[in-house]
Amino acid sequence: MTCLPKISIVTPSLNQGRFIEDAIQSVAKQAYPNFEHIIVDACSTDETLSVLRSYPHLRWVSEPDGGQSDALNKGFRMSTGELVGWLNADEYYLPGAFEAMAKFALANPATDLFYGDTIFVDEQGRLQRAKKGHRFSFWILLYRRCFISTDAMFFRRRLIEQGFFLDTNYRLVMDFEYFVRLAASGKSFKYLNRLLSSFRWHGSNLSLQAEKGREETLLVQRTWSTIKLPDHGYDALAELGRLYRVALKTLNGNYRTELKILRSRGSETRWFQNDEGRKTCTTLLG
């Protein structure tokens, strides 16, 4: 039997005590044999530290930092796994995510970064909608939207060893800048067509700070707009149209039954039908 790679999960934290236990449990209950969970807390003043102390398997620090990007970089440096994931304190993984991603990584040894699909939930964990991905395109990433959710993303340790860290000058779209910079540097991405995680929408999401986010996004686009990438054999505009047609068909087809079933099951146990037709139980919080 092939040995599954060690997975390191890094969670930045600041006063998310009401959510962070969901994140911790979603990692611990993966039934995955080889993982570590690193939490980098920025001196939270709520119940966060009492929650962290109740889970002895965690590696965590609570000290001042220079913001979320700085905290994540600190956690990345602390990590020891072959695969590294980024899970914010208000997000959580779906069951089976680690094993699915580990096997996908083993099957694609040349790939640097992997990403899958996520669901959006509200503060109580109630389903809002699914965020469906597609195969990687640099130009869609740069000019249309950041279609990679960090909670459904894992990258190889070699990126850390090569010095690829988040740019601490970015406070809202640091993930977008990181992905663009990696792609512009020739790093490879691969999409796994599977639900892996849950992104929680609530009033304190950093991504809700729209104006500052637009400014940072435009800066990234201006910085990398003249990059010369290898010819991959397709026209960028044609590829954009094709991927949108695929995404629209998928959202209107494959996930329609999944979302209907998810909504009918309440907030604790939900079901979805994956592409192979196997019914999979996802117990999100228990």
Image (cartoon, grey):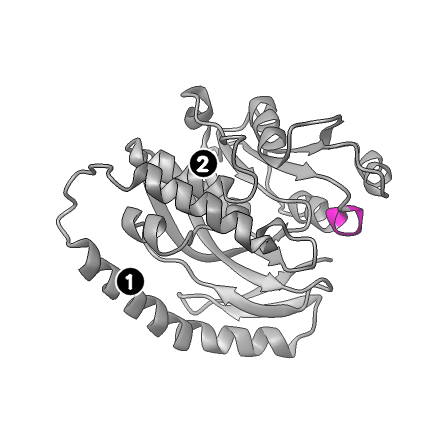
Q: Nearer the viewer, mark 1 or mark 2?
A: 1
Name the image quarter holding residue 184.
top left
Name the image quarter holding residue 200.
bottom right
What numbered label is drawn on residue 132?
none
Report the residue at 54% width, 39% height from top.
85
Instruction: Judge by depth and name the residue closer to the eye, 191 or 57.
Output: 191
> Is residue 266 shown in magenta?
no
Residue 129: % across, % down: 54, 69
**At label 2, which amino acid type do we have?**
Phe
Report the residue at 14% width, 42% height from top.
231
Instruction: Judge by depth and name the residue closer to the eye, 225 or 191.
Output: 225
Q: Callout 1: helix, strand or loop?
A: helix
Along the horizontal axis of the image, is 176 left or right of 143? right
**Distance from label 1 to label 2 (Cα)?**
23 Å
Q: How many marks?
A: 2
According to the picture, the residue beneath numbered tag 2 turns out to be: 155
What numbered label is drawn on residue 243?
1
Which span is picked out in magenta? 17-21
Along the horizontal axis of the image, is 111 left or right of 152? left
**At label 1, which amino acid type do we have?**
Leu
Q: Earlier in the sequence, mark 1 or mark 2?
A: 2
Magenta stretch secondary structure, dominant: helix
Q: Quadrant of the N terminus?
A: top left
Q: Callout 2: helix, strand or loop?
A: strand
Q: State if disc 2 and disc 1 touch (CB < 8 Å).
A: no
Residue 263: % across, % down: 61, 76
